[in-house]
Image (cartoon, coloured by chain):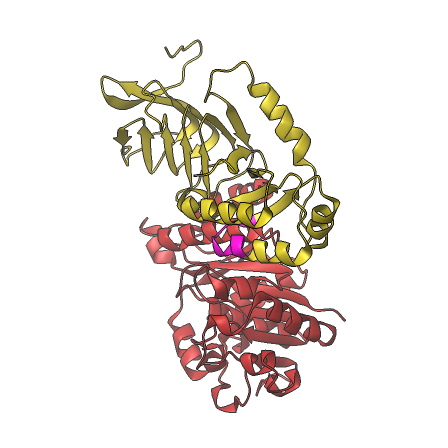
Amino acid sequence: MSARVITITSGKGGVGKTTATANLSAALADLGYKVVCIDADIGLRNLDVVLGLENRIVYDLVDVVEGRCKLRQAMIRDKRLEELYLIPAAQTRDKNAISPKDMQRVCDELRPDFDFIIIDSPAGIERGFKNAIAPADEVIIVTNPEVSAVRDADRIIGLVEAEQKGPAKLIVNRLNDELIERGDMLAVADVLELLAVDLIGIIPEDQAVLVSTNRGAPIALEPKSRTGQAFRDVAKRLSGQEVAYAETNGTGGLFGRLSKLIRTGGS
Amino acid sequence: MAETVQIKGIREGLLISVAEGDWPAAEKDLLSELDRQKDFLHGAKLILDVNGHGINAATMGRLRDQISDQGLSLWGVLSRSPLTERSAQAMGLATRIHQAEAREEEQAAEGLPAGAEAVLVRRTLRSGASIVHAGHVTLIGDLNPGAEIIAGGDVVVWGRLRGLVHAGAAGDEGAVVCALDLAPTQLRIASHIAIPPQEREEPSPEIAFVRDGQVVAEPWVPGMTIK
C-alpha cells in the first residue's frame, strides 16, 4: 500500500479548508479506506476540534518532528471510524517549527500504512502553505463563489503549478442557490471559467455544517444530509468513481458548457 | 546595480545570467538583485545561467531556498560546469532545454531596434504572476485578474486580458495593447492610466492606444492599421 498524499488549500482563509479536510477524510474512511489527516496549521490548530478529538491530544506534529515521540504516538484514532487517524498541529508553536522536508519525511513514513494522507493547509502563501504542499501528490483547492476567494485560488493554482504538483482540483464550497438565482453570487461555471481547473466537488451552503463542526461530528457521516452527500460524492470521485453532480441552480443547465470548460482547462 | 546579473524573459520564465568571476560575490549580487526586483518578479519561474561557476549541491540547495523565500521558484540551472550540472540534476532542476532557445531568441532579436526585442509567453498568467520585459510581450493564454504584464513596447494577448497591462512602460506613447477579449482591471500606456467601464458587450478583439492624451479601445477590424 502506498498512500496518495492530498493537500487541501485555498489561499484565502475561512473558505472551508478544515471543514473540507475533516469531511473528506471521514467520507473516505467511511468508504473503507485507511486515512490519516494531518493538521499543518501550526499555532492555529482546529482540525481536531472539527473532528471532535481535541481532548485526546497528547502529542502533536511538532513533537514528532522534534523527536519527542514516535509517529504512532501522535496519531489519534477517530472515535467513530476505525480507519481514520488525526495527527494534530501544535498550538503553542508557529509555522517555522517545521520545514517542508519534515513534512515529506512524516508522509513518507506514513505512506506504506495508509490509502490516503489528507493535509489541511493553513491560509496564506508563506511557510505554512509551503510545508503543506511539499509532500503532496495531489492538491485540492477550496474556494467560495466570491470574487476575492476565487482570486486567491487563482494565485494558489499558479503556485501549485510552479511546484509541479498540478493539475489542482477544485471544490466550490458554500454555493447558495438563492443568491445565484438573484444574480448576486458567482455560479460554478463563472468560477471554472476563470480558474480553468478540474472540478471535483460542489458543496451547498448549509447551516448544519456550522452545527456539525461545533459538535465535532463531520456532516459527511450524516446519511440524510444533502451537504454530507456532496462530501461523500467528492470522496467517491477521489477514489475514481464517476458521480454525477446534484442539480442545483448554480449548475443546472450549464453543464454542457461546464464540461467543455473542464476539458479545455489547465495550461 | 552591478552588471554581473542580467534578467530577461524567455518562454519558460525568466532567464537570469550571472557573469563569470568570484562565486560568493556573484551570488550576493544575484540575491540582492532578486530582492530589489522581487515585487516585479514575484511568482516567476527562474532559470539561472551561472556560466562556468562550479556550485556544489549544498550551496545550490541553499540558493534554491533563498530564491523561494523571495516568492520565486528556481526551475532550471544552466552551466558549463559539470559539478553545477550534477548538483542541479540531483535536485531535480532542469539543466538544458532552454539554452538553445535562449540563443535563438537572442539571434532573432538582432536587426531589431534596441529595446524592441519581443518575448512570447505561452501559458495562463494567474493572479500574482508578473512578466516584466523591456521590449514587446506576446501572451498566448489568459491574463487573469491579479496578474500583470509590464512591457517597454506593445502587448498582445491572444486570450482574455483581465489583469493589469502597462505597455510603453518606459514612456512610449505609441505603444498599443491588443487582446481577443480586452477586459483589464486597469490599462496603462506610457503615463496614461485607464480603468475600463464595468458594462461590457460581447467579447471581441480590441486594440487600445493613446489618442489625444487618452487611452481608447477600438474593435479590431480587418485591414485596420495603427500608425
Image label count: 0
Across and down, in percent, residue B72 comes to: 51, 49
Residue situated in front as seen by the camera: B109 or A190: B109
Nearest the viewer among A133 and A267 is: A133
In the visual, does A264 lie left or right of B43?
A: right
Please check the rendered image and state whether residue B20 is part of the magenta-colored stretch, yes or no: no
Query: Which colour is chain A painted?
Result: red
Q: Nearer the viewer, residue A34 or B71?
A: B71
Question: How far across and how far down the image is residue A135, in percent?
Answer: 62, 64
Specify whether B80 is left or right of B67.
right
Query: Does B170 sit above or below residue A29?
Result: above
- Answer above or below: position of B67 versus B131: below
Please name the residue shown 54% across and 77% down the image: A221
- Does the segment drawn in magenta span residue B69? yes
Which residues are the magenta region?
Answer: B66-73
Residue A210, percent across and down?
Answer: 39, 75
Q: In the figure, is residue A69 to the left or right of B126?
A: right
**Colour applied to chain B:** yellow
The answer to whether residue A58 is visible is yes
**Residue nearest the observer in this picture, A110 or A186:** A110
The percent position of residue A82, horizontal first and vertical second, equals 65, 84
- The residue at 55%/66% (across/down) is A132
Residue at left offset 55%, top offset 87%: A59
* Residue A97 in the image: above or below residue A82: above
